[in-house]
Amino acid sequence: MRTTLPIRIKKMIGMFFIVLLVIVYALIAVAVASATLANAPWYAHMLYFGFSGVLWILPAMVIIKWMSTETR
């Protein structure tokens, strides 16, 4: 037997995971940047932070999709 979560509970859990994702992802992105880009030129920093600033959206989309689907 499969139990289903109410949509309000799923949204609360999803919100918690998105906030956690953003915090952990930002810490990891900055740690990687400071370890690898210390002596890199400014455009390498721009490319890295531009790419890593958009990359977190992919796991967030999975969480948002899970939050918005109603299980039957």
Image: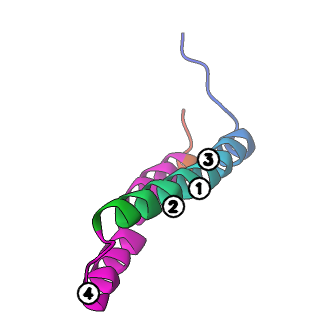
Q: Amino acid at mark 3?
A: Gly
Residue type beneath disc 1: Ile
Is disc 1 surrounded by few (<14), some (14 to 19) or many (20+) residues within 10 Å? few
Q: Where, quadrant-wise, is the C terminus in this rendering?
A: top right
**Residue 41, labelled with which disc?**
4
> What residue did someone put label 2 on?
26
How many angstroms separate mark 2 from mark 3 (CA)?
18 Å
Which residue is the extreme one toward the top?
A: 1
Q: Nearer the viewer, mark 3 or mark 4?
A: 4
Classify residue 9 by image quadrant: top right
Which label sits on residue 14? 3
The image position of residue 7, as x and y in percent, is 68, 44
Closest to the observer, 21 or 4: 21
What kind of element bears circle 2?
helix
Looking at the rendered structure, the kind of residue marked 4 is Pro
In front: label 4 or label 2: 4
Above/below status of 4 relative to 23: above
Q: Are marks 3 and 4 in contact (CB under 8 Å)?
A: no
